Image: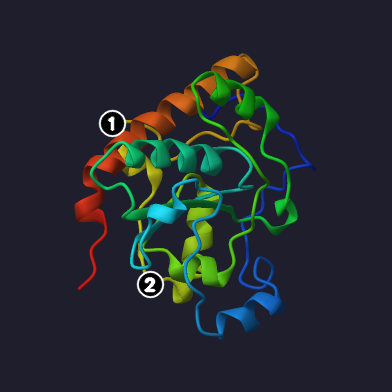
Amino acid sequence: MTNKNKLKFSPLFPNSPPTESSPISSNNLVDAQKPLLPKQSGNSLDHRYQSDDSYTILFLSKRGMSRSPLAREVLREKISRSPFFGKYRVSSRGVTQAYDQCPIDGNLRTYADKLGYVLQGYSRFATLPDLAQADLLIPLDHESDDFTKVHRHALRGKVQSFGTFLPAGSSPFVDDPYDRDEDVSTEETYNEIIHYIRLGCSKILLEIPSLISKD
């Protein structure tokens, strides 16, 4: 995952990190002052097996259109086949409000579908209540990592970047599919993203007991 000679897709995809004032609307600030609602399980088909006191894992990425939804589905699938089934909720959000309710990346959906991962729905912007309800927040890129730092006052859970679950020497974050090397094909880009996300989620599953605990 290199960072030189990358294609740029501006102005469609702004590069400026979120600020304290822009990413959270006044409506979200009002919502954050209200009592938190019972945790929801999103689109998971396993929601009826999740207890009210299950833990929440939240993946974050710049747009919430590709990397974080894929990580959500990969980890959900792994949890469903483990002793942790029903004990953990996994969700995803984007940290750039302009991409709220955008369709999931069609290219990624095609490649993921070949591996049995069904990416449905739309991206969702991370609100303060979303952040506050997460027991573990996992940023997949620089933008989402900055987002957790800007809004650290709203967090009660642990933040751990995705790169910490990858082999030593790996990039700390998963590459942006819209910002790739000129000589790298679309197929190679998405296959690499899928590979690293599956690899990282396997490590997350192994470390779940130590990652999340409640006194």
Q: Is residue 63 above or below residue 26?
A: above
Residue at image coords 64%, 42%? 65
**Nearest to the observer: residue 91 or residue 157:** 91
Type of amino acid at the residue the image marks with label 1: Pro
Residue at image coords 68%, 46%? 122
Label annotation for residue 156: 2
Pointer 1: what residue?
Answer: 167
Q: In this view, does 124 lie above or below 11?
A: below
Dot 2 falls on a residue whose secondary structure is: loop
Residue 54: % across, % down: 34, 62
Tell me if residue 184 can be seen: no
Tell me if residue 146 can be seen: yes
Q: In which quarter of the image is residue 134?
A: bottom left
Real-space CA distance between mark 2 and mark 1, rounded to the nearest whole angstrom: 28 Å
Q: How crowded is mark 1: few (under 14 residues within 10 Å), some or many (20 or more)?
A: few
Question: Which circle's residue, 2 or 1, is located before the other in the chain?
Answer: 2
Type of amino acid at the residue the image marks with label 2: Arg
Q: Is residue 15 above or below residue 200?
A: below
Q: In the figure, is residue 37 to the left or right of 167? A: right
Residue 215: % across, % down: 20, 73
Q: In the figure, is residue 112 to the left or right of 135? A: right
